[in-house]
Amino acid sequence: MAESAQATQKRQWGMVIDLDKCIGCQACVVACQSENNIPVNEEAHFNQRRAIQWIHIQRYWEGEWPHVKARFIPVLCQHCDNAPCEPVCPVYATYHNTEGLNVQVYNRCVGTRFCANNCPYVVRFFNFWEPAYPNSLKNQLNPDVTVRSRGIMEKCTFCVQRISRVRRQAKNDGTPIADGDRALNPACVNACPTDTLVFGDLEDPNSRVSKLRDKELVEGGRGYHLYEHLGTSPNVIYLKKVDKHAVEEPAHA
Amino acid sequence: MQEHIDLDQKQVNETLLKDVVGTPRWWLPAVGFLGMVFLAGVGAFGYLLNKGVGVWGQNRPVFWAFDMTNFVFWIGISHAGIMISAILRLTQAEWRRPVTRAAEVLTVFSLTAALMAAPLTHTGRPWRSWLWIFPYDFERGVWPNVRSAFVWDPSAVMTYLTASTLFVIIALLPDLAVIRDRTTGMRQKIYGFLCLGWRGTPRQWKLQAVAGILLSALVLPVFVSVHSIVSWDFAVQIGVEGWHSTIFAPYFIIGAIHSGVSAVATVMVLMVWLFKWDKVLRPDHFDAIGRLLIIVATVWFFAFFLEWVFALYTLEKPELVLRELQVFKMPYMPLFLTFLVTAFFFPVPLWLFKNVRRSLFWMFVTTISVNIGMWLERFLIIVPGIIRRQPTEFNWGSYHPSIIEILILTATFAWVAMGMLVFAKVFPLVPLFDIKEGMVGRHVIKIGRKIVPASIRE
């Protein structure tokens, strides 16, 4: 019966993003593109503002010249516990699974784009065109991930295919899922050279993410959620950049 | 006060049925032209089906634009029917008589146009839309998500479409019998079948009147529900700051009546110009609808003003940015000014003059202007709102419609116009029995020392 305990164990996948470590190298973006069969974003797609990047590094400038600082923030689906995208889907194409993931069922999606409008983080992407890959990349597609056709929504899944592969493996072997297992981590986490992204089970008190959450968010450190005032309770926690010269600006100034 | 229609019953039949029994010369070219415009839109839709939503100008984050604008616009036009035939019928406004059917038919066709705009051409995979619009999907066992405003939408619109169609059919029965008695051969058989055995017995008249009044009362909730639900497509969203507003439901309803009643006035002018029904549609009718429009437009403008007050009162940055975008930034500034002028500041002061209200030309110009303004209003709510110039929305851009979207928009107009023309050829667009009922029930009343014809009650 060890396997059923393994299967019914309550999990809550989450991520901690330490902005103090992010160097804006975009390795996570490339890893995500190749892991998740995301169509190649050509220049035209960016000009049409239809590029698909499940995780994207946003850069902005702080301060006046010559004291300008580049700031980076990786933005991906926040996997909100109270996700605004879920109740508005008429066909249940997006719903919350038992492991705290906000999942997208491509087969059900009819493409009303209601969810994309209701996402305050604007991290949902619509397939405006049929996905196209250059011939050299045809054999590179990940067999575990659906290639999405045109007319449907997609977004970051926390690499759900990797999670379920590890879960299956753990079930067969009767071993618990190890925290920080590289086979479990989403592609972006594995690719990050500076350990900015930390992925794990927020329900497990010994995992790195829940320790970081307790230290930085619960006890009051650098932790915050994006758009906390909307009450979406995201499972992605950001850690503020450490900057001793920073000037605090009041919110909604 | 109401002028009386100076025709006897035989003349009423002749005037109103001449284009059903015969065919006006311009009819076939007009319908052919509109049909071609409509087919161009169908072609554009085919191209859209073949290539995907990429052929539109939408992008991230502007996921809704022309499609939802057209949807809201046509649902708005459809509110003409319920206003004229339910509200005015229950309040016994006498001047509604010649326009009830035109308003109801306009409702039916504009609702179908709205369905074309939103679920049909709007979705990414239109061939699967029926799974949610007609949710009897026993095979997959996945039922629609009743929390979604997009599930409320089809139920409200379908209820309205059913009720309006029933309205049209019930009011048609006596007139179909009149046509049956005046045609021969195949046509007589078809009209005889359609009038469901109408012989004009007292019992049939009674049932028909009761059915009409019952339907009027039963569709009254639709009057508030349909456009409230359409507004909730936007207002329930926390993701778009500019849409998340509690005033949206009443604001959208009164806006819908503004554009719907204006559209009826436009149709009335066209009925006089095209079918020469100036003996039936008197300047008094235009005067009455003009007065109604002044009230509706003013209430709508008040709601519009309140929406701005509510938005600006908090002085929250996202709202201020949105309002600045709507009013001061290109390309929305000229659109906003056009909207303000055409929807309110041009027509409403003009309607205050009796000569304008009684002039066909001016009523035509002002009511067309209102609908241009009301289309722009919906566009200005939807697009600048969803552009979302927010701190974490790093994809700042704009939206430009593609030729495919414009073709689909014109196709919906052509569809409604063509539908009205075909209906006017096959059935009488002015209810004969209603006019005659008004003539029979007419009398004069004494107000003070003056004897005037009764215009409010019969």
Image (cartoon, helix red, strand yellow):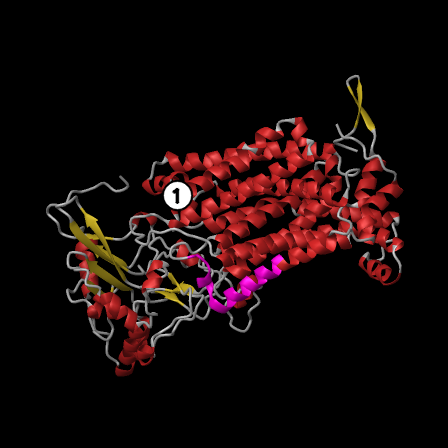
List x then y, in percent, for residue A138: 34, 79
Does dot 1 land on a helix, a strand or a loop?
loop
Q: Is residue B446 left or right of residue A220?
A: right
Task: Identify the residue at horizontal 32%, vertical 74% (top origin).
Answer: A161
Numbered circles on residues, count: 1
Give the magenta part as a residue range.
B37-58
- Can residue A142 be seen at all in this image of the molecule? no
- In the displayed structure image, the side of residue B399 where residue A17 appears, left or right: left
Image coordinates of residue A144 in percent, x first then y, are: 34, 77
Q: Is residue B190 left or right of residue B137?
A: right
Whole-percent x, y for residue B161 in the image:
64, 54
- Which residue lies under the disc numbered 1? B330
Residue found at the very far left of the displayed protein:
A244
Picture residue at 52% right of the left edge, 57% below the top: B151
Q: Is residue B43 magenta?
A: yes
In this view, the residue in front, B455 or A225, is B455
Residue type beneath disc 1: Met
Residue B222 belongs to the span the image colors magenta: no
Q: Residue furthest top?
A: B449
Q: Quadrant of the C terminus of chain B?
A: top right
Q: Position of residue B334 (x, y in %)?
A: 45, 40
* A123 shown above or below B101: below
Q: Is residue A161 visible?
A: yes
Residue in the image at 76% along x and 45% along y: B275
Return the residue nearer the eye: A238 or B435: B435
Residue in front for this viewpoint, B15 or A235:
B15
Using the rendered view, name the quadrant where residue A74 is placed: bottom left
